[in-house]
Amino acid sequence: PSQSMTKVAVVTGSNKGIGLSIVRALCKQFEGDVYVTARDKTRGEEAVKTLASEGLKSKFHQLDINDINSIIKAAAFFKDTYGGVDVLVNNAGIAFKEADTTPFPVQAEVTLQTNFFATRDMLTHFMPLMKPGGRVVNISSFMASRTLNQCSKELQARFRSEDITEDELVELMKRFVEKTKSDQHKEDGWPQTAYGVSKTGLTVLSMILARRLSKERPQDNILLNACCPGWVRTDMAGDKAPKSPDEGAITPVYLALLPPGATEPHGRFVSDKEVQKW
């Protein structure tokens, strides 16, 4: 069959941790090419070798979500090679450790830049590439719903509303970062967690984009969801966490492989394969 008939799955930030486990599971279950993507070519190719040693076939493409040119190049590659993308898992993300002494405004700016703004850039450039029947999975966190509940009533109302726009959400995320600089974020209704706010933003963005898909491409049956992999033993979360990376991959992979013809979940926040109240 020609290349464009070959299906393709792309997982960001997948040279290690949950991302690598998602690729591993897709190699076993997805009928098509599965791509490890990472900022660092050497680390990405190492991951492909690790999988090969387990008898699993994956491919590598360089992708740094914080570099818009890298996103544009990767998007062009997948469009030219496969005619689009069947599965996109936005896994790349960062978190500062509890003990990190980096000033909070810097943590806020850096965390939001990767987890919200760069992931949004990925979605902006890759959503038009999603093929009919495509699946988009944004890796969020249980910290998103916890953070939502710690926001002011006004912010909660906006983050839960059906009519919040992408532009409004972007302004709110920028506002949080700005307010941290003058240490006014708490009085502005925000909790003291940059990671939580970034994942709240990503979850709401997922809901906005899912509504847009339903409106603009109703025949294409593309399902887009945000999910929490759980508390997983990774470099990011530390070694006290109860779940292995392979266990953390279960819900993201379930959403990535929702069967043809499925209509839900869509625009939901999912944990342990269950739709969560938002």
Image (cartoon, helix red, strand yellow):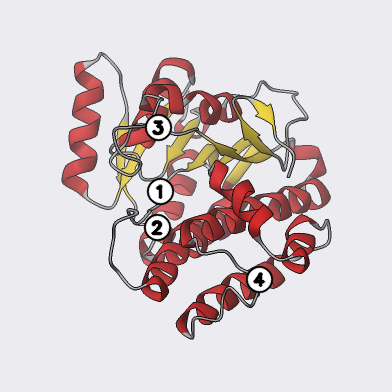
Q: Residues within 10 Å of mark 3 (few under 14, many from 20)?
A: many
Q: Which mark is residue 232?
A: 3
Give the quadrant of residue 272.
top right
Q: What kind of residue is marked 1?
A: Ala
Residue 143 placement (x, y as % from top left): 54, 47
Q: Name the residue beneath numbered marker 4.
A: 189
Distance, label 2 to label 1, CA atoms, is 8 Å
Q: Are marks 1 and 3 in contact (CB under 8 Å)?
A: no
Q: Is residue 153 left or right of residue 258?
A: right
Q: Which mark is residue 92?
A: 1
Q: Closer to the N terminus: mark 2 or mark 1?
A: 2
Foreground residue among 238 and 22:
238
Q: Closer to the N terminus: mark 4 or mark 1?
A: 1
Q: Which residue is pictured at 57% across the width and 60% down the height?
A: 124
Name the element at disc 4: loop
Q: Residues within 10 Å of mark 4 (few under 14, many from 20)?
A: some
Q: Name the residue beneath numbered marker 2.
A: 65
Name the element at disc 3: loop
Q: Is residue 23 left or right of residue 51?
A: right
Q: Closer to the N terminus: mark 1 or mark 3?
A: 1
